[in-house]
Image (cartoon, rainbow, N blue to C red):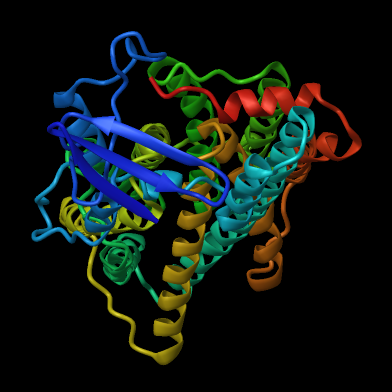
Amino acid sequence: MESTHLLGGSKKRVKIHPHTVTAKYATHTPYAPQPGVHTHFPQPGDDGYDDAPSFEDFGSFVEETSDRKQLTESRKWPLTLFGSRHNDKDTAHKLQTVGGGEGSEGSAKAAKGSGKGVGEQLASFGEASVSASRLTWVGLLGAALAHGSLIVLTRVASERFSLGPLFLLLVRSIVQLLSLAVPLHRGENPFGPEGYRLRLLCYGIAYSLSLCCAYSSLTFVSPGNATTTWRLATTALSATLAFLLLEERLGLADGITIAAGLCGLGLVLLPAVDETNSDSPTDPAVFWRGAFGWSLSALAGLWMALALVGYRSLKERVGVGTALFTVSWTGCLLAPASLALLQEGWSWPTSVEAWLLVLGLAACSVIAFLGMTHALTRLHPALVSASQSLEIPIAMLLHLAVLPLAPTAPEVVGSVMVILSVGWLVAMKLLPSRVGGRRQREEYEEILDSPIK
């Protein structure tokens, strides 16, 4: 219960409580930045007077931190696709960290845990982070399986249905335009937040150029050699570019593991015995045709490394759905240009099986893209690319089932080295955290928390 009396021009406000009675005097009405908000400012001589905000700053502070403004901003919708009415308010999808909602909820619960010591809270946070990391690596291995299936489906479509690789790239880009619904559903600008659209455009162009070069190389060299060269160049160049552009370094153990995987890919590229012992003269046209195909594969690796590093720098600003839409519409522009440049004919699917094959190819490409792009929010680009080297042995096994071709001895040894390197990489990141090893976890957290310059 409250009562107010006028005593000599001043107001006396009395609060009556069953146990205490307090009175507060004021010569004027308390300053209220908003209706219903009463604030008492310290007077000279009171504790905290020097730290009190000024009248000018306090009003804006209450306005910025009010719940009413936060609720209003959460309901805003961009009026146009190329610009928004308000500034860059992307803190909501900035928390799209890795591992999905389970890791995020676990981290929040660990941070809010009351009654726990600092050590217990840090341990809980570490376990939640490793749990999210397990989901990340599962997504990466699924992406490698999708990439391996993509290689086989592309070869089957080319040999049995006479569908050109660049035409398949164009069809999958058109199908992936449906990803526009994801950023629109989340209230995000499909062309990226303001201030980051040029970098997102460069990322999409680099990714689409990489795919165009990779698919064009299939016309000049075998799919196995083109894919292996592409993956080898991507892994090696992404490690170098991440250090030069983002100042992200690989640990010693990671570097050794990736180098072993690259050696395995090099063994896969070794020519067969019958090719090395061939005494017939080489046709210059065939030689230059093959050299052009190898060059396209290496160039595709360079563009893909730039794309991985580019998204790594945008991971806190651009969602996976927006990135997929960017790659899709840039691919719709660059794929026809590549078709016209290489004069590759248009060959539409003429049967239900061919259309099902094309749709399966598009689905595998979406799964592979989502797994890789999601992992880039947590892992070094070279680690993401090295894990995708599993597509080589996966494609080899699928070739034995679909297209019975016996692999050579270097291909078998190289594939085993790739499998062992990726398996050791996954075990080194995840298993030590379960048995209590702390040094490996600290190195892993350094990679996760490395700043983006």
Whether residue 447 sits left or right of residue 299 in the image: it is right
Above/below status of 316 relative to 364:
above
Q: Quadrant of the C terminus?
A: top left
| Camera-nearest residue between 408 and 452 | 452
Above/below status of 373 relative to 335:
above
Asked if one can make out residue 220 in the rendered structure from this viewpoint, the answer is no
Rendered location of residue 385, percent (x, y): 55, 39
Asked if one can make out residue 382 in the rendered structure from this viewpoint, the answer is yes
| Camera-nearest residue between 17 and 84 | 17
Q: Quadrant of the N terminus?
A: bottom left
Occupied quadrant, residue 309: top left
Q: Residue at x 86, y 40 (%)?
A: 434
Rendered location of residue 292, percent (x, y): 35, 37
Q: Residue furthest front?
A: 8
Q: Residue at x 53, y 26 (%)?
A: 236
| Camera-nearest residue between 447 and 156 | 447
Q: Residue at x 31, y 55 (%)?
A: 322
Q: Residue at x 56, y 61 (%)?
A: 146
Rendered location of residue 246, percent (x, y): 42, 21
Rendered location of residue 15, percent (x, y): 40, 46
Whether residue 356 sits left or right of residue 447 in the image: it is left
Whether residue 414 sits left or right of residue 383 in the image: it is right
